[in-house]
Amino acid sequence: MRIVVIGGGTAGTMAAAHITWALPKAELLHVSSSRVPIIGVGESTTPAVPRWLDQIGGPSFAELRARCHATTKRAGCFEGWGRDRARFLHWFQPTGEHAYHFDARLLVEVLGERIRAERLDAFVTAVRSDGTHATVELEDGTRLGCDYVLDARGFPRRDDPDVQPLRCIPTNAALVQFSTPLAPPAECPDVTRNVARPHGWVFLIPLGDRTSVGYVHDETISSRAEVEADFEALLHEEGGEPLGERRLLRFPNFVRRTTFDGALMRVGNTASFTEPLEALSIGTIIFQLRSFTQWVRDRPSGARRLRPRPRPRPLAGADAAADAAAARLASFNQGLASYVRRNAVFLAWHYAAGSRHDSRFWTQARGCFPRAAHDRALAADVERFLELARSSQGLRVDDLDRIADREQWVREVFPRLRNYRPFGNFSELNVAQVGQGIGWLPVEEEHHAGHR
Ligand SMILES: Cc1cc2nc3c(=O)[nH]c(=O)nc-3n(C[C@H](O)[C@H](O)[C@H](O)COP(=O)(O)OP(=O)(O)OC[C@H]3O[C@@H](n4cnc5c(N)ncnc54)[C@H](O)[C@@H]3O)c2cc1C
């Protein structure tokens, strides 16, 4: 089996590392162009990342700390969000789980050492797929035929007809820069801070030697000069000095109708994107890669060659098998798209109670979640989310920070849960934490906790 991975950013590098581990017999070709820079952000993660690194034999935390300025992360700290509280923590679950912060560019170098592949520095001009085989065309005219191609070339073109915008997320750009190390909150040092500001919100990600700062906003509401001025004000309040260049990154929030066609699989920013509020992208890459390699393992090459038929005809023999293949593929794509849409709905909800800032951005952002209920593509997910929010009422979450390990979590928190179905990357416990944090869900009194 021949697989081509395109892209040397976080997604392409992770894809090549994952295939090296999961499909060791595959002939792997890793193509990327040194002419096209990687986006170079993506420093905050979820616990899926340490789990995946351990599984594939990737770098340990000690190596990441030494080579990628890594630190540990136990929660997200929301400052100035919602109605009542100055700040709240959104813990991973089980509480006691941890994730990492690291320098995304250095991670690519370290992970690259684990890849077993033929490497090519070349510009790809086209990728063609008929759903059973793919061809990658290079600038010099070379054509690389393969069984599968993983395309991780970064954000798609604006006019790509397969892209469905996720309008429920109220941001589309970020001003990013490093700063000298900023002090973490005293009560919980191992966090990504998400600070509400008049033009949006700012992530503060503590790395070993500096802090990564990003002012996430809506370019159609705030001018670059306004955002720059408040960026400076924040750094001044925090006592940080800017380091290196400041960059404006524009991003689309979107999901694809077809992430995988049977031979061409999109991975990373080219497959889907939601703003970095809950640091979901790298975890989503892992979800995409696990889904892909599972698909390949479940499909011996003979079965895969049955090309899905576009229109239903009377079932018979090979036709029936082809229809079954088409149904499996549709379900595969729906699973990936639903995961991203649900994460988008949960992100939109973070804004639903506004913030301490009474600005144009926040007025607009507060309306995103209610508007999502009228978006045909999102309505069913919003409905399901509201069910989850109702069932999470009464989960008392203020005491989660004292839960130290998995055993205590299983003993004390697990019995309180009622709804075990995940919602994208999240569960009712995440909904309860954010909902109570922003003041959208009432906080239950202590004596109710034992009855859940
Ligand atoms: C402001 C911001 C903050 C973010 N913060 C986080 C975070 O905290 N946590 C998180 O998980 N994620 C975060 N992300 C998402 C992050 O961008 C992704 O996790 C990650 O970088 C994936 O990038 P990528 O590899 O898909 O694309 P890129 O980094 O853009 O890589 C694309 C690769 O494709 C190659 N390429 C492109 N075109 C061609 C071509 N024609 N031929 C050959 N090669 C080509 C390029 O050379 C490059 O190697 C953030 C994103 C933004 C915008």
Image: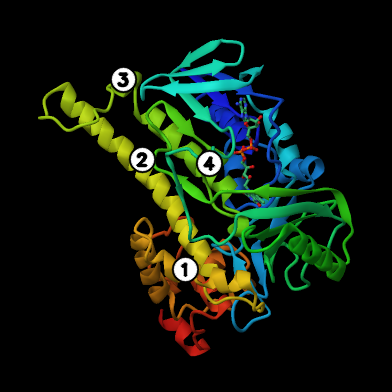
Q: Residues within 10 Å of mark 4 (few under 14, many from 20)?
A: few
Q: Looking at the image, which residue is at 64% across and 56% down?
A: 98
Determine which of the numbered discs, if any, sits on residue 305 in the image.
Answer: 3
> Circle 1 sits in a helix, a strand or a loop, which is it?
helix
Query: Relative to residue 47, is residue 159 depicted above or below?
Result: above
Q: Which mark is residue 369?
A: 1
**Label 3–label 1 contact, CB within 8 A:** no
Q: Quadrant of the N terminus?
A: top left
The Cα–Cα distance between marks 4 and 2, rounded to whole angstroms, is: 24 Å
Element carrying mark 4: loop
Instruction: Indicate yes or no: mark 1 CB to ligand 1 under 8 Å.
Output: no
Label 3 neighbourhood size at 10 Å, few (<14), some (14-19), many (20+)? some
Residue 426 visible in this rendered orientation of the protein: no
Q: Give the crowd class for mark 2: few <14, some 14-19, many >=20 residues within 10 Å.
A: some
Alpha carbon distance from label 3 to label 4: 32 Å
Q: Quadrant of residue 300?
A: top left
4 or 2: mark nearer the eye: 4
Type of residue at label 1?
Phe
Q: Upstream in the sequence, badge 1 or badge 2?
A: 2
Decide if residue 192 is on the left or right side of residue 384. Answer: right
Amino acid type, residue under disc 2 in the picture = Phe
Q: Earlier in the sequence, mark 3 or mark 4?
A: 4
Name the residue: 35% across, 45% down: 334
Q: Amino acid at mark 4?
A: Arg
Q: CA distance from mark 1 to mark 2?
A: 27 Å
Ligand 1 found in image quarter: top right
Name the spot of residue 161 as percent of width and height, x first.
43, 39
Looking at marks 3 and 1 on the same chain, the residue that comes earlier in the sequence is marked by: 3
For image coordinates 31% across by 39% down, the residue present is 330
